[in-house]
Image (tube, grey):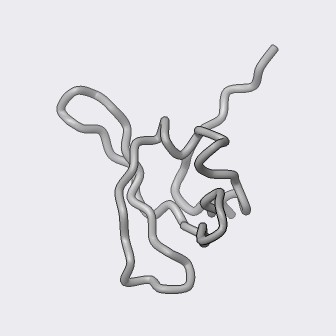
Amino acid sequence: MRRKREVVEGQIYRKVGPSGGFWQVVAIRKDAMGTRHAQLMRTDDPKTLKTLSVAAILDNQQFEIAADSP
């Protein structure tokens, strides 16, 4: 049985690729259609933020978890 992964605030993900960087989940929200999105903050530059769908973050070809939430 496959375990369902979940994106929660505090987790840190590494962007897959040569210039990936590390991103921390700072907020989770749903849009009007019910799709969950996560606001991410770059760990080495807290002023750099981006918002991605949770599905994109869970795609192991785009991101991998680096640290779970405390």
Residue occupying the point 54% across, 66% down: 24
Percent x, y for residue 1? 81, 14
Residue at the right extreme of this rendering: 1
Quick check: 52 above or below 36? below
Percent x, y for residue 55? 49, 35
Residue occupying the point 55% across, 67% down: 23
**Occupied quadrant, residue 11:** bottom right
| Front position in the image: 51 or 11 | 51
Residue at the top extreme of this rendering: 1
Percent x, y for residue 34? 28, 28
In the rendered image, which quarter contains the C terminus?
bottom right
Number of callouts: 0
Residue occupying the point 60% across, 60% down: 15
Residue occupying the point 39% across, 58% down: 39
Quick check: 1 above or below 41? above
Quick check: 64 above or below 24? above
In the visual, does 34 lie left or right of 2? left
In the visual, does 31 lie left or right of 24? left
Residue at the front extreme of this rendering: 18
Percent x, y for residue 4? 67, 27
**Occupied quadrant, residue 58:** top right
In the visual, does 44 lie left or right of 48? right
